[in-house]
Amino acid sequence: MTPSHSDRSPFAHPWDVSPAAAVEIQRRLAPHIVECPLAHPIRTVAGTDMSVRGARVTAAVVVLSLPALERIDYAIWEGPVTFPYVPGLLSFREVPALMQALAMLHTRPDVIMTDSQGMAHPRRFGLACHLGLLLDHPTIGVAKSRLTGRFETLDEAKGSTVPLRDGGAIVGAAVRTRQGTKPMFVSVGHRVTLKDAVSLTLAVTTRYRIPEPTRLAHLLSQTGTKPAAP
C-alpha cells in the first residue's frame, strides 16, 4: 500500500488539530462511508494494532492468508505520539502511525481488520472507518469493548451474534467468538457489509477470543519483533 495514498485522497485533512476540530472532521467525513458487499473472494486479511510507551508509538500490521491463516507479511513502524488520548478520537492518535506501517507491506491485503470501532461509534466514524476511507479500501472494526449502543442477550455458543443498536440504528454486532467469553464488537469500517464483517471475523478466529489478525498485530506491537510460528 503506497505511503502517499492517503495524501492523494479527496478526504485527506490535517492531523495536527484540536479535539474539537477532530470531532468536526469526523462529522464531515462520516457520510462518505460506503457499505457494500466485498467484490471478490478474500484471500488475505491484515490485522492492525498500536502500542504506546511514554511518548513513542509502535504500529504493527500482520497479513494472514485465508483459509490457512498463515502469516505472509508483516511490518512495524515506530514514531512519536502526536495526539492525546481522547475517547472517540482514537483514529487521530493511531491512523497516521498505522498508515506508515501499512505502507511498508510487500503485500496488498484484501481486507484490513482493526482493533477498534468502525461505525459502532457515537459519530459513526471510528478508526476503521477513518482508515478505510483514506485508503479507499475494505476495512472492518473488531473491538474488545463497546463504545456505544445496546444489544440483547447473546447465546453462549461460539458464532452467536446479535445486532448492536444505537438510536434505533444497527451500528454493528456483538459476536461470540469463543464459547463462554465476552463478545467482540464488530462493525463496518468501509466498503464491506456488516454480514461480511461478522462472517470474516469468525473465519479468522481460532482458539482465542480475539481474531488472529489483530491478536498477532497486538503481540507484534508489544514486542517489536516477529511473533513465533504457532
Image (tube, rainbow, N blue to C red):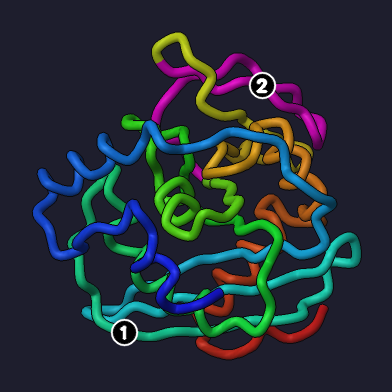
Is residue 23 shown left or right of residue 158? left
The disc placed on residue 201 is none
Marks 2 & 1, CB-CB < 8 Å contact = no
**Residue 142 shows in the view:** no
Residue 116, position in %: x, y? 47, 50
Relative to 129, residue 97 above or below: below
Q: Which residues are magenta?
A: 144-166
In the image, residue 15 above or below residue 121: below
Position of 90 with respect to 192 (left or right) is: left
- The residue under label 2 is 162
Give the farthest residue toward the right: 68
Q: Amino acid at mark 2?
A: Val
Residue 111 in the image, given as x and y percentages of width and height: 66, 57
Q: Is residue 156 magenta?
A: yes
Density class for disc 2 (Cα within 10 Å; few <14, some 14-19, many ≥20) is: some
**First of labels 2, 1 by sequence position:** 1
Looking at the rendered structure, the kind of residue marked 1 is Gly
User: Of discs 2 and 1, which sits in the foreground?
Assistant: 1
Query: Could you tell whether 38 is left or right of 129 in the image?
Result: right
Q: CA distance from mark 2 to mark 1?
A: 39 Å
Residue 17 shows up from this direction: yes
**Circle 1 residue:** 79
Q: Residues within 10 Å of mark 1 (few under 14, many from 20)?
A: few
Residue 97 picture quarter: bottom left
Up the image or down, 56 lies above or below 142; here it is: below
* SS at badge 1: strand
Q: Secondary structure at mark 2?
A: strand
Q: Examine the rendered structure and indicate whether residue 39 appears above or below residue 121.
A: below
Name which residue lies at 72% across and 46% down. Answer: 201
Please identify the quarter of the rendering in which residue 14 is found.
bottom left
